Image (cartoon, helix red, strand yellow):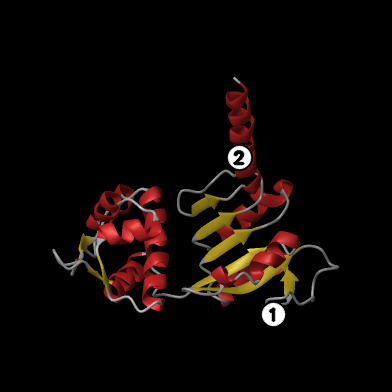
Amino acid sequence: MAFKRYIPVESISELTINRLSVYLRCLQQLEHEGGTTISSQELADRFHLNSAQIRKDLAYFGEFGIRGVGYNVTQLREHLVNILGLHEERRVLMVGAGNLGTALSHYSGFNTGGFRIVAILDSDPHKLGKRVPGGLTVESVVNLTQIVKERKVHLGVITVPASSAQRVYDDLVDAGVQAVLNFAPAQLKGHPEVKLKNVDLKINLELLSFFLTHAARMASV
């Protein structure tokens, strides 16, 4: 398998990267089941994917698999882990110890596969010093810059109210965080040097509501 190590990041779409994560999960499941090789068509059939899209996405990063044999499941999984940067530990800091922040702080996806939450912060004095289910103790957001530097934080997660989200994002950027995942229902003004990804749960619910509304109207025609 040939793996290209130098790829212009700007030429790879987020949709492609999202699909790589899906492929990785599929391969992890296959490996857990004892699978050793699989073709792109078999992978697509098994997990309801598109075989041509799989081949196109992987082609950005090299030549994987053997014609007539398919992909070695373990080797391809390892390549995807490296491509996604999951072979390195990514230290995560959570800002906002409300219901969502507390739930996410012990979500296994944030503490496995290369990620580790190293702190959860809040400004509410009633929450400071309390332990969350994941085992962390809520610390003061006043110490954000110091904690980022001392614990070598790479990634910040925002779970504060919308009114505070921009200020928290700016503080994370000033502290040296390299990427931010924002769960607050607010459109933030980004910084070019820091990758910002928004996850607005309400927008997704409203999208589903749109389809439910118009599906009902179409059915009544």
C-alpha span from label 2 to label 1: 35 Å
| Residue drawn at x 47%, y 73% as measured from the top left | 113
Which of the two marks, 2 or 1, is nearer to us in this view? 2
* Residue under the point 39% across and 65% down: 26
**Where is mark 1, residue-wise?**
135
SS state under label 2: helix
**Label annotation for residue 177:** none
Look at mark 2 in the image and give the residue it sits on: 208
Residue closer to the observer: 100 or 149: 100
The answer to which of 83 and 63 lies nearer the viewer is: 63
- Label 2, residues with CA under 10 Å away: few <14, some 14-19, many ≥20: few
Residue 69, given in percent of the width and then of the height, sits at 17, 68
Q: Is residue 187 visible?
A: no
| Residue 89: x %, y % from top left | 46, 75
* Position of residue 173 measured from the top left corner of the image (x, y, whole percent): 55, 57
Q: Nearer the viewer, residue 142 or 104?
A: 104
Hey, what amino acid is under mark 1? Gly
